[in-house]
Image: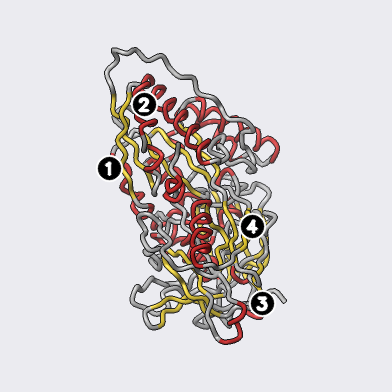
């Protein structure tokens, strides 16, 4: 039986942006609080790899193109674009009259610099840009991208907040009171030791910003993602454990809150790691992954979460309607007990706690060694040489290609190379321009990768918008991140 406080320990590698509004004091100059920011923020864009950081950047930067709550591509910095017949050339036209928060106009050279910086520095987002062969400034307000292959997901990739446009030559200055220069609805400013979002008067839709200032509230501890004792004023995407903690805290403080479940594609999974001692053993892979599949089933039932079915979340093109069931291999009692080494990204160690876990592991001839690392240390996974890595993430954007390339970071190798005999079907799926065929190919690939026991699907992580009465926002739907410009006072 899972202890109640174990659910509170469940913190995904994702961190969450939030804030609650006190309407009674709104006209008295009280600044609402936007909470649970990672202590690593702000830091250089090239180092950012957590969901909460992406959500924060979404308020400061604007991408080249954007997506609405229905998943449709819309304008960003570019007012329009055209795609060549072979899909390998895209021309973006930048609307004149747009400015960064420092007053400089946004031009094609800024787009070129921003995209190339991600590619050169091999950032998290660079995993989605591998098909970009060249970025050209073909006119002061015209950018041309040359692709090595047609990529139907490239526009969605370019809508990532992480790929927001910064000025040509911009570099991060950790000592600056405004470390990011963007064109989004808010500026990040430091005052008297605290960080604030302040309305950007140069934003193209500044008149739509109804809450001019937010104070950022940080996690009490990045290792455990503890929320501390302070309730911010609004949480647009709180995980189930965060929601439970907020509910408990609000009861203690006798402070009423309201909640609404959001569309969520966040899920956990466990991956057979190429640096592990047992990587080349089919027998050990079968035994260890079958154990993990059974263990996840038990924990999911205890947590009352919906079990994931594959690497592509339910609701995204190519998902599996039903989970592939693992068969438990025959284990001889005389068989030597082996150590299963698991790297856990975030506070998932509770999954491997309890007598029932030890009993189950014994039945598989295993003992479990758990190594916990913080999301910001994800680059150290391979040095731990784990058999399995466990993590959770929201993907990069809502498409199969928004989830798969991120595995480069977890696996420490190029995901395409990791696939082995599954490589052809994946490569065919990512360039297929018939959306029905593309979905079928990704579904087939999704099924095979589970059947080969390369991964064990975890569970869907429910997300909630939590707020006090008097505050409303647009439902984010299929948009990757919430936008504070949509947060309004009720009349």
Q: Compute the Cα span from label 2 to label 1.
A: 29 Å
Please state if 374 lies on the left or on the right of 129 as rendered.
Answer: left
Provide residue 180's location: percent of width, then percent of height.
Answer: 45, 73
The answer to whether residue 460 of the structure is visible from this angle is yes
Provide residue 324's location: percent of width, then percent of height.
Answer: 56, 27
**Sequence order check, earlier mark of 3 and 2:** 3
Q: Are marks 3 and 2 in contact (CB under 8 Å)?
A: no
**Sequence order check, earlier mark of 3 and 1:** 3
Please state if 227 lies on the left or on the right of 427 as rendered.
Answer: left
Q: Are marks 2 and 1 in contact (CB under 8 Å)?
A: no
Q: Quadrant of residue 171?
A: bottom left
**Sequence order check, earlier mark of 2 and 4:** 4
Task: State which mark lies toward you, 3 or 4.
Answer: 4
Please tell me whether mark 4 sits on a helix, a strand or a loop. strand
Task: State which mark lies toward you, 2 or 1.
Answer: 2
Residue found at x 55% / y 63%: 235
Task: State which mark lies toward you, 2 or 4.
Answer: 2
Relative depth, front residue between 345 and 431: 345
According to the picture, the residue beneath numbered tag 2 turns out to be: 359
According to the picture, the residue beneath numbered tag 4 turns out to be: 260
Q: Are marks 4 and 1 in contact (CB under 8 Å)?
A: no
Please tell me whether mark 1 sits on a helix, a strand or a loop. helix
According to the picture, the residue beneath numbered tag 1 turns out to be: 383
Q: Compute the Cα span from label 4 to label 1.
A: 41 Å
Q: Compute the Cα span from label 3 to label 1.
A: 48 Å
Residue found at x 38% / y 46%: 345
Q: Are marks 3 and 1 in contact (CB under 8 Å)?
A: no
């Amino acid at each position: 039986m899972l202890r109640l406080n174990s659910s509170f320990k469940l913190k995904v590698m994702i961190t969450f942006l939030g804030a609650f509004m006190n309407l009674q004091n709104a006209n008295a100059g009280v600044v609402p609080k936007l909470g649970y920011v990672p202590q690593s923020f702000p830091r250089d864009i090239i180092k950012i790899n957590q969901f909460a950081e992406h959500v924060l950047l979404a308020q400061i930067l604007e991408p080249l193109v954007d997506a609405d709550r229905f998943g449709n591509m819309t304008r960003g910095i570019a007012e329009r674009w055209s795609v060549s017949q072979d899909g390998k050339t895209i021309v973006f036209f930048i609307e004149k009259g747009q400015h960064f928060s420092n007053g400089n106009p946004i031009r094609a050279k800024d787009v070129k610099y921003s995209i190339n910086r991600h590619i050169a520095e091999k950032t998290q987002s660079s995993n989605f840009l591998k098909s970009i062969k060249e970025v050209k400034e073909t006119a002061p307000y015209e950018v041309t991208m040359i692709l090595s292959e047609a990529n139907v997901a490239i526009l969605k990739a370019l809508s990532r907040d992480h790929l927001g446009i910064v000025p040509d030559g911009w570099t991060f200055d950790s000592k600056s009171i405004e470390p990011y220069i963007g064109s989004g609805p808010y500026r990040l400013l430091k005052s008297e030791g605290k960080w604030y979002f302040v309305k950007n008067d140069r934003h193209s839709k500044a008149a739509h910003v109804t809450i001019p200032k937010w104070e950022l509230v940080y996690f009490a501890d990045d290792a455990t993602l503890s929320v501390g004792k302070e309730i911010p004023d609004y949480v647009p995407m709180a995980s189930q454990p965060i929601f439970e903690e907020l509910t408990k805290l609000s009861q203690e403080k006798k402070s009423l809150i309201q909640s609404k479940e959001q569309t969520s594609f966040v899920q956990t999974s466990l991956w057979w790691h190429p640096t592990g001692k047992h990587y080349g053993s089919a027998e050990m892979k079968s035994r260890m992954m079958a154990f993990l599949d059974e263990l996840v089933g038990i924990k999911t039932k205890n947590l009352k979460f919906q079990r994931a079915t594959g690497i592509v979340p339910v609701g995204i093109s190519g998902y599996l309607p039903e989970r592939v069931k693992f068969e438990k291999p025959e284990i001889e009692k005389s068989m030597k007990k082996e150590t299963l080494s698991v790297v856990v990204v975030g506070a998932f160690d509770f999954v491997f706690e309890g007598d029932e876990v030890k009993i189950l592991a014994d039945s598989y001839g295993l003992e479990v060694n758990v190594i916990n690392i913080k999301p910001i240390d994800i680059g150290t996974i391979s040095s731990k040489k784990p058999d399995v890595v466990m993590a959770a993430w929201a993907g990069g954007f809502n498409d199969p290609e928004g989830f798969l390339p991120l595995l480069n970071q977890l696996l420490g190798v190029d995901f395409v190379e990791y696939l082995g005999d599954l490589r052809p079907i994946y490569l065919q799926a990512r360039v297929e321009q018939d959306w029905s065929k593309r979905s079928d190919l990704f579904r087939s690939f999704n099924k095979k990768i589970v059947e080969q026991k390369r991964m064990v699907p975890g569970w869907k992580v429910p997300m909630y918008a939590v707020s006090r009465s008097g505050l409303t926002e647009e439902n984010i739907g299929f948009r990757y991140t919430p936008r504070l410009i949509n947060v309004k006072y009720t009349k």
